[in-house]
Image (tube, grey):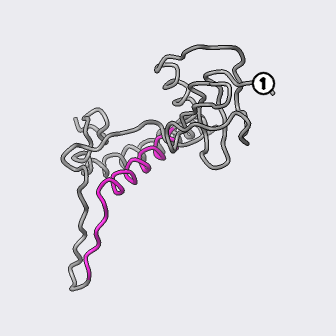
Amino acid sequence: MNILGIGSRIKHPELGLGVVTNVTSKHYWVTFIESGLETIDVDSTFEVIDAIDGEVDSVSFYEVERTLKNILQRWSDVSQVVPIADKWKGGKLVMEPGTPTQNKEVPIDVFFNKIIMVRDRLRVMEQKINSSNLDNSEKVELQQYITRCYGSLTTFNVLFKSTSDYFVGEKTK
């Protein structure tokens, strides 16, 4: 059995996708997308996605981060981690109906993550439109709809930690 080198990418049946960040004679230290750093036995059951051979003593954090970003981009529609503004951490969204019924409470970070998912899916849709066989006038028309969607979501900009993550709609002249 060949030992995988640092930087090898694997898919574990329970832990999901990960990158080997350290190797011993009996264990792999693997940074998994979902669960973080875990130690697994060398003879564990997993699928090798990309094997790197050879003895490597160390790997830089940059190399691990770059590899994880590549895995995320390849295997999911999430483009980046977007932090919520500090003042909202641990908060909750309370929806109070106009009629006397029970309020609905949602952890604000759950609500925020759903907004980020909408944004990421709009970005994927933009990419698909741009790479489609539609003629340019159809592409422009669809892009305008997406821009209006971004504009409708600007209300939620208050939740973002960084202004560079804000939704931006159509600019008025």
Q: Which residue is drawn at 37% across and 51% down?
A: 115
Q: Does the magenta stretch include residue 48?
A: no
> Which quarter of the picture shows residue 43?
top right
Q: In this view, does 94 lie to the left or right of 114?
A: left
Quarter of the rendering containing residue 56: top right
Figure check: 82 above or below 21: below
> Residue visible at 25% across and 54% down?
90
Q: Report the residue at 21% width, 46% height from top.
A: 158
Residue 22 lies, in percent from the top left, at 58, 24
Q: Main secondary structure of the magenta part?
A: helix
Magenta residues span: 102-126
Residue 130 in view, yes or no: no
Residue with the most extreme bottom position? 100
**Viewer-proximal residue among 115 and 29:** 29
Is residue 162 in view?
A: yes
- Left or right: 66 with respect to 158? right
Task: Give the amino acid at mark 1.
Answer: Asn
Image location of residue 160, percent across then percent down:
27, 42
Q: How crowded is mark 1: few (under 14 residues within 10 Å), some or many (20 or more)?
A: few
Q: Where is residue 78 in the image (x, y as percent from the top left)?
A: 49, 41
Q: Where is residue 111 in the image (x, y as percent from the top left)?
A: 34, 57
- Give the answer, above or below, for where 149 lies relative to 163: below
Residue underneath mark 1: 2
